[in-house]
Image (spheres, rainbow, N blue to C red):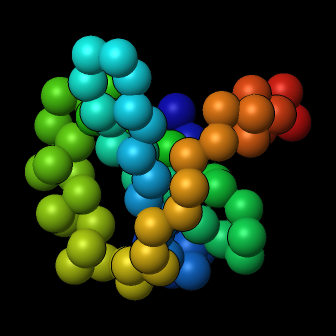
Amino acid sequence: MKSFAFSEFDGFATSMLESNYAEYEYLYLMKGNKKRVKISTFYHQNYLEIKQYLTTKVKYLGDIPFSMSDEFREIFQ
């Protein structure tokens, strides 16, 4: 597992993925204009705790629109 220092990031951004049954929030730790770490309510039971902690450590950069094509492209980079 890779470790990061908070100082390695410019901040974090969030986006919402809406499905037929639920809405999922994604949080991205950003460096430049790149998403370096992804955390989501879909995969992480303790997402809100993680998000609350991160807000004390890194700057909130705002919301970004969710893009499924971006997500797939980033998987294969």
Position in image of residue 6 (x %, y %)? 45, 72
Report the residue that reaches farthest toward the front.
Answer: 20
Give the residue drawn at x 65%, y 42%: 67
Position in image of residue 40 (x %, y %)? 36, 37
55 left or right of 27? left
Q: How many marks?
A: 0
Q: Specify the quadrant of the image occupied by residue 62.
A: bottom left
Report the residue that reaches farthest toward the right.
Answer: 77
Give the residue drawn at x 59%, y 66%: 30
Position in image of residue 55 (x %, y %)? 25, 73
43 left or right of 35? left
Give the residue drawn at x 45%, y 67%: 63
| Residue 65 visible at all | yes
Q: Specify the quadrant of the image occupied by residue 24.
A: top left
41 left or right of 2? left
Q: Is residue 26 above or below residue 65?
A: above
Give the residue drawn at x 52%, y 33%: 1
Q: Is residue 34 above or below residue 6?
A: above
Q: Is residue 25 above or below residue 12?
A: above
Q: Is residue 12 above or below residue 38?
A: below
| Residue 43 visible at all | no
Q: Quadrant of the C terminus?
A: top right
